[in-house]
Image (cartoon, rainbow, N blue to C red):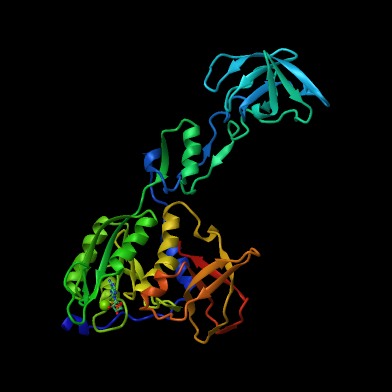
Amino acid sequence: MSEAMETMPPVPDLLGVAQARARVIARGRTLAVERVPLAAALGRSLAVDVTAPFDVPGYANSAMDGFALRGAELPQDGERRFVLAGTRLAGDSRRAAIGPGECLRVTTGAPLPDGADTVVIKENVRLDADTVVVAAGEKAGANTRAAGEDYARGELALRAGQCLTPARLGTLASFGHTEVEVHRQPRAVLLTTGDEVVAPGEPLGYGQIYNSNRDSLSALLRAAGVTVLRHEHLRDDPAALRAALRRAAAEADLIVSSGGVSAGEADFLPRLLAEIGTVDFWKVRMKPGMPLLFGAIDAALLFALPGNPVSSIATFEVFVRPLLEVWAGRDPDARPRWYARLAVPLHKTHRRAEFQRARRECRDDGTLWVTPFGRQGSGVLRSVAEADCLVVLGEEPAELAAGAVVEILTLD
Ligand code: AMP
Ligand code: MG
């Protein structure tokens, strides 16, 4: 117990959220680049700009099943007959051409025959032996796709830093790529602490709680594209914590811990980080999550998040996520901001930034509304479990009327 009696590192004046966030962002560097198959690239961050290597589509083609013809020959009134000169289904590699007064049967995706610039859909024509009867009302140029109208050769198609969504993987495949250059995924070790904390599946004794942070933080990390190397649960014992931090720093880019970071008798992390690494900041003027600790051990960055489940999730959203954005080659400040109107009045008396758990709702007049939950205690996991966003309140005390516009951080 003697180690526990030693003094804590001095707490400098508490940082505001924006200052603390800027310090986190300043510590991030874009992670190295690797090539992965498209099938393994979903959700990864593109490391390079991608330009179209050729026109997509590569040739003018039909956008519908119908008859390709010359638009200038369409009737202005009444009907006109076109001689059916043949058929080209998509995939037929023979070139075709039509002469004056002719048409060609085509399916969606089939190249337009030379001489044609228009497709009349099959539902709008009448077949009469080997002629096709077209009535007035059709538009010249309709139902065709020009070469390069999707992506023109040399055109910037995707930008470095973009997240590879299913559609963007499709774009890469349409260029014939089988692999893509992405930023390597950060590797994290997750540590949870607390003598009272027991793994789900174990019997629960008096005074004990189940470890909920292990699953929620691990899921947050993995959903954000982090490889979670492993999780360790640690007792509130400085020697065990010190050894675990050193082990984690040897393998991980990122160490995320929960608990043991306040000023209680069993809160060893601030002192341990000062001893074996560097403390960048400890404590932020925010609610929930004030005792957040950030620093480094060797090359690994460490976020020691508060143990309260709500605080750990909120501090993850506000501080860990921006670092992950930097590592993925993105500007965290370019992330789109969301605003909504308060559905209920809010009364804020303290001088810390606050992140209230809330639900948003889009009304049928196109406005977004947000309802913070009544119970905002930092131990109330239900408030985050039922939330889909956090309402961001600045440091100043405020009387906010219903309808006031506030910033929100989406959680989904
Ligand atoms: P601490 O930050 O260690 O003082 O913990 C603050 C609160 O969070 C206490 O009520 C702890 O019991 C609780 N807590 C700490 N770690 C966890 C965890 N992994 N899962 C659920 N609750 C936790
Ligand atoms: Mg604890």
Q: Splitting the image into 4 quarters, where does residue 216 fall?
A: bottom left
Q: Splitting the image into 4 quarters, where does residue 368 fall?
A: bottom right
Residue at 53% in and 59% down? 335
Say above or below: 110 vs 256: above
* Quadrant of the picture in which ligand 2 is shown: bottom left
Residue at 74% in and 23% down? 134
Quarter the N terminus occupies: bottom left
**Would you say 184 lies left or right of 342 here?**
left
Q: Position of residue 246 (x, y in %)?
A: 22, 63
Residue at 36% in and 71% down? 312
Say above or below: 31 vs 400: above
Say above or below: 278 vs 351: above
| Badge count | 0
Q: Position of residue 169 (x, y in %)?
A: 46, 40
Q: Is residue 61 visible?
A: no
| 312, 139: nearer the viewer | 139
